[in-house]
Amino acid sequence: MDIKKMFYGEYGGQFVPETLIPALDELDHAFENAIKNENFIEKFNSLLRNYAGRPTPIYFAERFSRKYGLKLYLKREDLLHTGAHKINNTIGQGLLTSFMGKKRIIAETGAGQHGVATATVAALLGLECIIYMGKLDAKRQEPNVKRMKILGAEVVEVENGSMTLKDAMNEALRDWVKNVKNTHYIIGSTAGPYPFPKIVAYFQSVIGKEARDFFDKNCILPDYVIACVGGGSNAMGIFQGFLDTNVRLIGVEAGGKSNKIGEHAMTLNLGKKGILHGSLSYLLCDDDGQVAPVHSISAGLDYPGVGPQHAYFKDSGKIKYDFVRDNDALQGFFELSRLEGIIPALESSHAIGYVIKNQELFKDKVVLLNLSGRGDKDMKIIEKKI
Amino acid sequence: MRGIYIVGGYPDKESFLKIADIVLNKMDFIEIGIPFSDPVADGPIISSAINNILGKINVKEIIDITKLLGKEKNIFYMTYSNIIYSYGIKKFSDEVKNYIKGIIIADLPNRLHDFFYQRGLEIPIIPFITPESRESDIKEIIKYRPPFIYFIGIRGITGSKADLDNSEIIDKIKVIKKLTDIPVIIGFGIKGKKDAKKAISIADGFVIGTEAVKVQNNLQLFIDFVNSLQ
Ligand SMILES: Cc1ncc(COP(=O)(O)O)c(C=O)c1O
């Protein structure tokens, strides 16, 4: 195994128990073969098209644009089956699971979108499915827990630690160590040990490809591309379509309530280098290396780590990482709902809130925003704010 | 080589020192766990002891109490990558290299040992062999001449039960023994005297973790447990 290929600059790697190494090698091998295999790619593309509903439109948000003085285009991942970009990845990894001859899949979930997308693909492909979800997340994203159960998945509520995404991922890794022979772990973001960041970025790259095609056809490029960043998959998905251009790329992290440790999830903005869940990247942890508590109003961004590609692009300056607070996200949520009739996921609402907060910067600019998901799942959180 | 794993600093510094002394007197080596907030290789018992002590003791304090146990003792550390990385790999190494004989890093696979060595670690990292390891993997790790090989007898995390009659395990150990004279220690899943005896018969030793940590907060029960292994 060539160690260098596991790293993006200095970030990435495979910091996992030895027991998982053969499975990661097997996965890498299967992935590299699969994407060269015509049948696999055809199956993947056909499911994206006929099952998930790709390509997703690019929609010009006219009333929003008029009010805030810019030209805002939305990449409508919220219109996908199951309601978020997560399904792109789970279809890909679900097919890989079958390709490897495994019959059982596990996944972690925060917002429940990745859990639902995994449970959906499990039903589609006839695989056994266990979803790990922090107890706090299961409460605040309750509609998604019900959906997973309807789809036939077993939902394990994790009561360790902060009872959120990080702890769900710990539990999923423990399961994988025990059951690695017959189980594939579908990691839901560009996080985790190599080859996951590579695989997830690949399966999400369709977002950026479609978006780039749209702009190429119209013979323009946007001035800015904006996406929210949790683990980083929807952002990597759309940014990959524009890495060869000078379009400014901005990832928006969850600023929570304040810069105080425990009150935000600004890994790239305020974290330092560290190792969690298989890769070296930026991390919110104390001087002793203990992972810090995090907070975000959106469960999908409530994570102390971030994918290694983002750490790499932050250092290189290719992508800028900024943040908005919970309240900005809420404003984005309501503004898009009431100006455009589109209820966004609270994760995606961070990107919208960012546009509102920085309307001066974006004045008269063409801005492409990845609307990574829809907000039905967030009713429990929003209820109290109406 | 018979060893016991205990969680560093648990349940408190004084009790920990007493327990560590007992282990060093009655067993051949001790593995001291440096707590990490996200112990993905540990089951509920060890995780909960770690959780209990987090925030009450820091890495520097664990290093300091290790030094109280004396130089040239058969002390090993067990921890996770981020603990050493965040402390500063070279700084960590410089501070403890005269006090411990090796380090087990639960989330550091063999192929990434160089990642730590290249950044200044001068303490031997104990390699893992699992039932899945290939012969080429074994050849790769013995090049470093580690103090011992950590054989993970189960697919699973700490707290599960090993099946030492399983031919897969026995055969794998035979393969290792054919390739090297480095001692093979069975870790994970050893519960009590019966397993311990069995481990000694098929390998060169064992480490008991979960069963020891279960009684780590009760000195008398801990002494009884260690005695039951004799
Ligand atoms: C709609 C939506 N957007 C974004 C995210 C954040 O994940 P990532 O940064 O991997 O896109 C999630 C995660 O649950 C999500 O559900």
Image: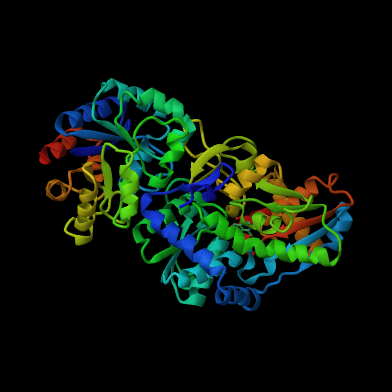
Residue at (55, 37) in percent of width and height: A273
Relative height, residue A320 to residue B59 (above, below):
below
Residue at (64, 79) in percent of width and height: A50
- Whether residue B163 is visible to the viewer of this picture, yes or no, is no
Spot occupied by residue B192 in the image (x, y as percentages of width and height):
16, 47
Spot occupied by residue A384 in the image (x, y as percentages of width and height):
64, 54
- The quadrant the C terminus of chain B occupies is top left
Spot occupied by residue B60 in the image (x, y as percentages of width and height):
41, 25
- The quadrant the N terminus of chain B occupies is top left
- Whether residue B48 is visible to the viewer of this picture, yes or no, is yes
Spot occupied by residue B75 in the image (x, y as percentages of width and height):
27, 30
Residue at (29, 56) in percent of width and height: B131
Q: Nearer the viewer, residue A73 or B105?
A: B105
Q: Dividing the picture into quarters, in which one does residue B57 lie?
A: top left
Please say which color scheme the image uses. Answer: rainbow
Q: Nearer the viewer, residue A368 or A40?
A: A40
Residue at (32, 47) in percent of width and height: B128
Is residue A154 found left or right of A51 in the rendered image? left
Which quarter holds ligand 1? Answer: bottom right
Is residue A79 found left or right of A189 in the rendered image? right
